[in-house]
Image (cartoon, rainbow, N blue to C red):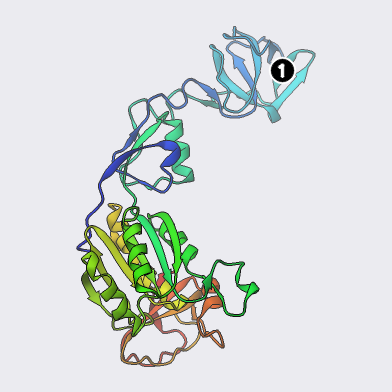
Amino acid sequence: MVTAAVALGVEVRPLAHADGCSLAEPIRARIDIPRRDAAAMDGYALGADPVLGAPLRWEIVDTSTTVLSGGEAMRVATGAPLPGGAMCVLPIERAIVTDGWVESDSAALERSGIRARGSDLRSGAIALAAGCRIGPRALVAAAAADVATVVVRRRPRVGVLVRGAGLVAPGDAAASRDTTPDVLGQALLSFAAVWGGRPGDSVRIGDDSEVFLTAVSAMRDRADVIVLVGGAAHGARDATKDALGPLGLKLGFDGLAIRPGRPTWYGRIGETHLLALPGNPTAAMTVARLLLAPLLLRLAGEDPAAALAWEPMPLLAPVVSTGAREAFLCATAEAGGVRVLDRGSDALGQMMLASADRLVARPAHGRALPVGASVPCLRF
């Protein structure tokens, strides 16, 4: 599935609309950072050659002064450009101010407290390397480099299509006992954004095949990946695939030997990827973590292996043996290890998902494991 996917290419985007994208080309500074010598702290910029005496003193001049002469000082704030002739910045906490004069509480003065021009980055130097994901901190560096547009790898557009009778938007279910909140539509769009996708529409439809076909056909025009929810259950699965036949569906796989998520299937219609997930929330989010995350990274031109960085952790509580399928169990990381979560009476695991921050992988026919046994874990 992932190996057959091809990166979507690159595009030029305004910096203001590049959040979440990965750089296809490095960002180079267009200006020196800082642009001129600047104060590294609040205090007084001191000119050379203080007024001799005991102690050494500098006369405070107006803050509009552009060049300090010997024996002059000017009040400066952190980050402010320094006047010419400044030899150092005297920190405010070390300054003794009396009648328009400033003196230091120490005779030792060095060229300190100054951020020299270009000391962070020189014009033309690389501010952010290719491959960097644009986020809040990267935006700081990109803006400081004075760039308005960036060349990024195109993020895959993701649409979610949720099938099921009686599904309504969260907040509307209390009006009727025959309705159920759609718990996965927005959750999967949020998940896609975390893993490099560009969230699109989430559409709820019933079980009518013609309506389903129309909805998929319309979503193809604005999505590189369509996530089908509720179209991977036994019985409904074949009907769903048959309904997509007129659109030219080509199956990649049909069913997985895992728990949860056995009826999952994947295919393509032209260049559009379709991943069909079970309607069970725990199963859907588990399979999305295992399959959708690396697919989105691949389409965005990033390394899909980054989504599957398993790490060993010791169990804090015993786990039972597994059945004939490989199992992926919701768990939470705690001090010193990982604890597999029990669904209890929550058959769909919806409340458990809020606590789970790890998946624990167990092999088919795996034996029961005691406290302290090492298990492979994936951030959920």
Residue 133 coordinates in the image, percent (x, y): 38, 48
Res 97 → quadrant: top right
* Quarter of the figure with residue 91: top right
Residue 178 located left or right of residue 311: right
Residue for point 37% across, 58% down: 158
253 lies above or below 11: below
* Furthest residue in direction right, as rendered: 99
**Residue 176 located left or right of residue 292:** right
Reading the image, the residue beneath label 1 is 102
Percent from the top left, x then y, of residue 212?
36, 69
- Front-lying residue, 218 or 60: 218
Whether residue 293 is visible, yes or no, is no
Query: Image point 45% across, 33% down: which residue?
Result: 143
Can you say whether 6 is above or below 277 in the image?
above
- Above or below — where is 8 with respect to 229? above
Camera sees residue 34: yes
